[in-house]
Image: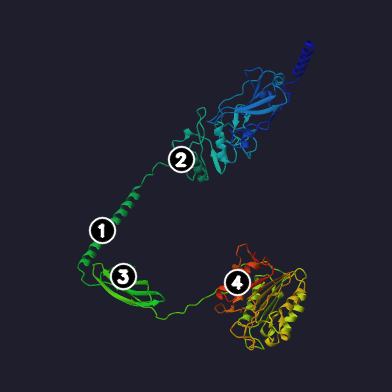
Amino acid sequence: MYSAALASLVGLMLSITLQSANALNLSCKRTSGMHDGFSTRSVFESWFPKRVNPTADEQIPTSKDTQVSFQINGAKYTLTPSKVMTGSLPEKAGYKSVTGVRYKCNATSNEVKIAFGQPGKKANTKSLTTTASTSAKTPQSKSLVRWQRKTDSYVCKFAPKFNNALREAKRRGLNCAVDESGSTQATVAGLTLTQVPVSQHSNPSICNFATYRAGLKTVWTTSKDKQVYVQEAKRRSLKCGVDSSGSTQVATATSKPAISSAELDAERRKRLQAEAELAALKAQKQEQQKTISSDTKAPLLTIDSAVTEGKQGIILGRATDNIGIAEVTIDGQLVAFDVSGNFQFNTFVPATGKEVLVEISDLAGLSNSKVVSLSRSDGVQPATLSFASLNPMGRKVASNDTAVALIVGVDAYENTPARAIYADSDARVFADYASEKLGVPENRINILVNDGAGEREMLLSVKSWLSRAVKQNQSDVYVFFAGHGLASDDGEQMYLLPYDGAPELLDDTAIARERLFTDIASANPRSVTVFLDTCYSGITRGTDMLIASRPIAIKALKQSVPDNFTVMTAAAGDQTAKPLEEAKHGMFSYFLMKGMEGEADANQDSKITAGELHSYVQTNVIQQSSGNQTPELQGDANRVLVRFQ
């Protein structure tokens, strides 16, 4: 067994020995990632590529028989019998050494020794110079990719970014400054850089951007873009720069420029002029003081006007003096005045009037004064209430393309002198709220007012126009009626009075509310919302009775409504729907429309339900009517009526 194993080993060694020095294709793949000692991954990979193929020429001596070492582009690689190769860099230019970059190879160190033979001579490690290399690659390299060996010379391959290139050269401890073509002059980041021996310059303050290596010292000069160059000097904490011509003979920032004799003469003339002006001012002040001390004439005070505008009094006056006014005071309060002595004073004037003391004094201390009386009008304005104007053009809502609206308003009637004050105005304004707040298209809104709202017109609008306009199970229907309503004698029936209706002939000339709802429901809409600014007590929005022979108000009994109906009425069955005189609208109608503007959105969720709107209207109507009018709601309180975008 021992002999067989020995024969096998000898055969393997003989097989490898018979290969030529270049027969072994040694290939190693990097298995470790980016090392912390490098600024970027590209810089790391410029030293330690993903794949390395060491050759016999790159082999260097090693003290261990079980290892094979190579030096490639300045980095050292050590291969062990386990086919694991590690890369390292020595410490350079103050940067820490780099070790432990791992590769997996296709051959062991013993196989490499047999294939390559004896280790080659140690690589030349002379100080790097700036000798040109004709074998350098294209100058458009994206990074400082590698160092290329040419006999004993090396070429710096600089990146387009000047700062990064110099920083990387310093990290490597290299002293070179040539471009990739081998030229000793390179244009990098807008700078023309030239390597010049320091001995050619006598000024010790020149920027030395190069490193010190083997006794060689170099400097950079530039021919353009001074600002970039100075910024680089500042980044390196150097107090030097270059001028716009590219000269390197520039003094340090701490040096002081010499002052010429002409500049000294100009400074002396400025100083003498300032001294002369100061002397003239001093003489003028002395003369003025002399005039003041001899003055005996008191200042003159003139009150041009003293008026009251509302509760504010306004005094306009003028103070003059031969030597100058020192101050103006009114009731002890200093008042500003201009160069001519004009002044203005504003003050509150109570209902009982007010007297103020105006005093002036000059520079000599002489004074003058006057008492000014201010009064207010005795007229007492009556207390009034005001309400904000209606405005449907505020917050936007989505369009409800299938919705329809029937709007009726009757102020003056044909068969009764009792008016429903502002009812026609309520109807016209509500039409805008139907389009702007309920989203009803304007061409799907039917408006009937005054003599256009007779019994025939109202019934045809429901049975003909509305039934044709409704899209079954899709359309939302809105009905608004402002005008007279009346209940039957027993209170069981409630009627809406059209323009030509007669209060004495309700069954024949008025429209029963129950019939109106039935006709609308027969069109089969998705929902119906009804707003009724009317009452059924027989008392008008004023104080008139619709039927003189029936002076006692009738209480209408509450009627049920269809399932998909939501009905808001202005008042309870025995109450009267009143106007809001200050707003020139029916009280119910005004707060109904004001709430739809957004004020009824109690929870601020950009939606107004029937319950929220009714609560807002009811609260305000009860307050303004002193509790004599209470709006009511029947139907679905959760139905969303207004939905803001």
Mark drawn on residue 279? 1
Which residue ends up furthest to the top in the rendered image? 3
User: Which residue is more in the foreground, 24 or 335?
Assistant: 335
Question: What is the C-alpha distance between the residues marked 1 and 2?
Answer: 46 Å
Regarding residue 176, the answer to whether it shows in the image is: no
x then y, percent, for residue 269: 31, 54
Q: Nearer the viewer, residue 103 or 260?
A: 103
Percent across and percent down for residue 441 are 70, 72
| Disc nearer the start of the sequence (3/1) | 1
Give the residue at mark 3.
331
Query: In the displayed structure, would residue 289 be above or below residue 91?
Result: below
> Which residue is located at x 52 percent, y 27 percent?
214
Task: Look at the image and tell me in which quarter the N terminus lies.
Answer: top right
* Real-space Cα separation, disc 3 to disc 1, in angstroms: 41 Å
Q: Nearer the viewer, residue 58 or 594?
A: 594
Q: Please indicate whether residue 477 sits to the left or right of residue 303 in the image.
A: right
Element under disc 4: helix
Quarter where residue 476 is shown:
bottom right
Can you identify the residue that label 2 sits on? 240
**Kind of residue sitting beneath label 1:** Ala
| Residue 618, label in figure | 4
User: Within 10 Å of the Cα at label 3, are there few (<14), some (14-19), or many (20+) other Cα atoms?
Assistant: few
The amino acid type found where label 2 is placed reads Cys
